[in-house]
């Protein structure tokens, strides 16, 4: 197991991403942050707090359970209610921890569009590890990490894991 980002490098990446989001969108008008559960929702909240802090605003932020739109798992018996924020004609910034094959993002886009037709959907990820199966790319990336298919990338967030960081381990050897 190897730590590739500690708490401070994770924070620096999120601060940079927050500034890139504001810069690329020429401000915050019409922006909505949507975090993909579980860790994406905590990263979205952090980005919101950062953007709100330096832009003196209150960007809408919500979380999205994508299980209803996955093509590889059974839908939840308790589907999530529609997003708590309107997305119609808004620029939605989807936030996730790791971009891998692209299937989670595809499901999230379906979920957002189910709740209303967004003007644009952008993707912000803390780690892009490659190996895409779908033509999906991130607009805002904390760190590009070339990996092998035998490796697993895990983002740790203090709200769930008790600490912040990003680790890479061989599949099946996460506890080493």
Image (tube, rainbow, N blue to C red):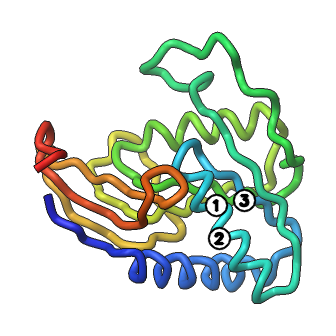
Q: Are marks 1 and 3 in contact (CB under 8 Å)?
A: yes
Q: Quadrant of residue 61?
A: bottom right
Image quadrant assignment for residue 22: bottom right
Residue occupying the point 26% across, 60% down: 167
Please tell me whether mark 3 sits on a helix, a strand or a loop.
strand
Q: Which mark is residue 33?
A: 3
* Quarter of image, res 15: bottom right
Q: Earlier in the sequence, mark 1 or mark 3?
A: 3
Instruction: Look at discs 1 and 3 and give the one toward the viewer.
Output: 1
- Give the residue at x 85% y 43%: 84
Q: Secondary structure at mark 2?
A: helix
The residue under the point 39% across, 81% down is: 9
User: What percent of the width, then of the height, locates residue 31?
Assistant: 80, 65
Q: Residues within 10 Å of mark 3 (few under 14, many from 20)?
A: many
- State the SS at label 1: helix
Residue position marked by numbered label 1 in the rendering:
44
Estimate the spatial distance between the alpha carbons at disc 2 and disc 3, rounded to whole Å.
8 Å
Sequence order check, earlier mark of 2 and 3: 3
What count of labels does the image hold?
3
Q: What mark, if any, has residue 107 been given in the picture?
A: none
**Residues under numbered marks 2 and 3 in contact, where contact means CB atoms less than 8 Å apart:** yes
User: Nearer the viewer's eye, disc 2 or disc 3?
Assistant: 2
Give coordinates of residue 169: x percent, y percent. 16, 52
- In terms of depth relative to the viewer, which is nearer, 62 or 70? 62
The answer to the question of whether label 2 and label 1 lie on touching residues, with beta carbons closer than 8 A, is: yes
The N terminus appears in which quarter of the rendering? bottom left
State how far apart marks 2 and 1 are (Cα): 5 Å
Residue 47: image tag: 2
Q: Left or right: where does residue 19 sit relative to residue 164?
A: right
- Residue at 44% x, 58% y is 162
Classify mark 2: residues with Cα within 10 Å, few (<14), some (14-19) or many (20+). Answer: many
């Amino acid at each position: 197991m190897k730590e590739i980002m500690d708490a401070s490098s994770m924070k620096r990446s999120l601060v940079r991403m927050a500034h890139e989001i504001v810069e690329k969108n020429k401000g915050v008008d019409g922006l909505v942050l949507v975090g993909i559960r579980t860790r994406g929702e905590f990263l979205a909240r952090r980005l919101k707090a950062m953007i709100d802090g330096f832009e003196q605003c209150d960007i809408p932020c919500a979380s999205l359970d994508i299980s209803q739109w996955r093509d590889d798992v059974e839908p939840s018996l308790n589907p999530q209610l529609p997003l708590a924020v309107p997305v119609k004609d808004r620029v939605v910034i989807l936030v996730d921890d790791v971009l891998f094959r692209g299937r989670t993002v595809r499901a999230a886009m379906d979920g957002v569009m189910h709740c209303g037709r967004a003007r644009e959907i952008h993707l912000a990820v803390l780690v892009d590890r490659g190996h895409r199966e779908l033509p999906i790319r991130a607009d805002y990336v904390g760190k590009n990490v070339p990996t092998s298919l035998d490796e697993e990338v895990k983002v740790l967030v203090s709200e769930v894991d008790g600490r912040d960081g990003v680790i890479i381990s061989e599949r099946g050897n996460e506890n080493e």
